[in-house]
Every structure is written in structure tokens, then in C-alpha cells.
Image: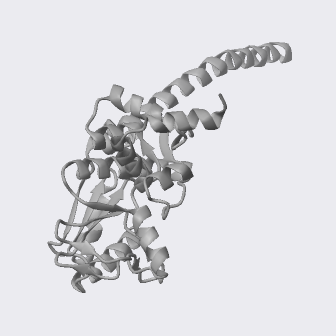
Amino acid sequence: MGNREKEEEALARVTARDVEVLEFVARYGVVPRDAVVTWAGTARSMTARREKRLLDAGLVCLTRLPYRYEPFLLATRSGLQLCTRDDLPVAKASPDRLAHFAAAARLGARLERAGEILLSERELLSHERALGERNLSVRLANGHLHRPDMIIVRPGNAVDEWGRSWAKRKPTVLEVELTPKGGRRLDRILSAWRGEVAAGRFAAVRYYCSAQALPYVQRSAERIGFGPEFNATLLPADCLPANLQRRRPGRRLFRHLMFLSKATQKISAVAEPASRQFAFVVGGLGLRLG
């Protein structure tokens, strides 16, 4: 049996729920396995069986780079077509943004599981490309455009065919911040969002931050005078990359001090015999000269 026949046989075993999970993967692009577990509300064993069905049917693929991350799911072109999301491009796993993609997918899974209706960054980009203008992005003071990570579309809040206008209830902007940004850059972004909220395009702006990034975002909001429409909170621990989850204060400094201590010991061990030999030679020369 050829690969084509095997994929067709595997496709016959794909369920309607599998297609719903496939659409979630397509919407967020690069999705860690635990985000699929959260969104689907199933055990890991069930998620593993579903993943195998989608893999066998050629609807998703796994990326394993870089080595420090667990495998991520990406929807293939066939998968995008099956879940009728061929308006979205095939995602690319960029190593420098992989942690951000994972955090956004995990947060999106948690919020959607709780009943929120979200549009991911990929969906916002699709709307803008179809419309031919960046109407879901915000223009910064330096002229650059900034697109949010997600927006919350409340029940009763509808977007027309390509996001030209919002009806009834305005959406809420969601941003994920893992690493500290410079004060000027944050000020430009938050000032732009404050202007959009004041203009009535959005209801509020919500930031989910790591413990390292949260103080920078809060100070920026205070500097520009963002009102009660702004909220910055800690990103849930299970949404964080592994290297940011259980970091203790001073742990990096402790590691550096230990390294310096060991290096000093090694230098002393090498330098002490050499100094003794030098003293012996100098002493011998003194005896000879005397």
C-alpha cells in the first residue's frame, strides 16, 4: 500500500472532533501538545491518539527544533483545507519566537476553554490581507504598525466580512509579554492602544506578562497615564516557557558566584606550585651570587 492509500485510509478514521482540534492548531499556527490538551479538555493519552490520526492522515506535522522545546504541531496545507481555513498560511516555526507562539497558544486555549471567543494573530493578519489594509493593527508614533497577539470577541460582538467594523460590543486587545522591552518602545505601544481605546475602536487592553516583564509594563502604563481600561497581570504559570516557570530570585547570581569560586580555586591550584618554584629558583640564584 502506497503513502497516498495510507493517508486516505487514515483520513477515513478522522472524527469531527479531530477536525475541530485541527482548526485550533491552524488558527494559532505553532501549538505545543499541552495547549491541545487544555483546549480539547481530554487526557494526554486521548490527545496522543488524536495526534496520531492527524499525523497519519497528513493533516499535521511535528517540528522538533530547537532541541530544548517539546514537539510542536503545525497544520499542513491539506489540514488547512480540510478545516476550511485555507485563508491562513502554513505556519513556520521560527526558533526565536517559538516561546512566544507557545505562550500565546496556551493562553488562547485556556481562555477559549473558559468560554471566551478569540481571534488569533494569524486570523487578524488574514483579515487584513483580505481587506488590503491594516485596520486591525495600531500605528505607533514612529510610523510603524503593531498587531496584537489576540483580541477577545465578546458574545453579541460581531465582525463583518473582513473586520471593517464592530457591532454592539467592542473587542478587547490581548498582548503576551515574556521578555522586558525598552521603556520607549513600550510607551509607544501603550500610547497607541490608549488612543485606540479613546477613539472607541476597542473596549480595553489586557497584558499577560512573565514576572520579569510585568514591572516594565506597569511602569509604562503609569508613565503614559493609561486609565482603568488597561490591565496587566501575570501570565499563568502553565503558559510560561519552562525556563521562566520556577526561577528563584538571585539564582542566576548564585550560579555566577559558584562559577567564580571554582575558577578561583583552579587558578590558585595552578599558580601556587608555580610561585613556589619561582621562589626556589630566586633563592638558589641568591645563594650563587652570594
Residue 232: x, y in percent?
Answer: 23, 61
Residue 207: x, y in percent?
Answer: 27, 61
Q: Quadrant of the N terminus?
A: top right
Q: Residue at x 48, y 41 (%)?
A: 72
Please identify the residue farthest to the left as the structure is shown. 228
Reply above or below: 262 against 21: above
Q: Residue at x 29, y 61 (%)?
A: 118
Res 184 quadrant in image? bottom left
Residue 2: x, y in percent?
Answer: 67, 32
Q: Residue at x 21, y 77 (%)?
A: 225
Query: Would you say 60 lies left or right of 136 here?
Result: right
Res 124 quadrant in image? bottom left
Query: Would you say 108 lies left or right of 2 here?
Result: left
Reply above or below: 39 against 51: below
Please identify the residue farthest to the bottom as the structure is shown. 199
Q: Residue at x 47, y 49 (%)?
A: 30
| Camera-side residue of 284 and 220 | 220
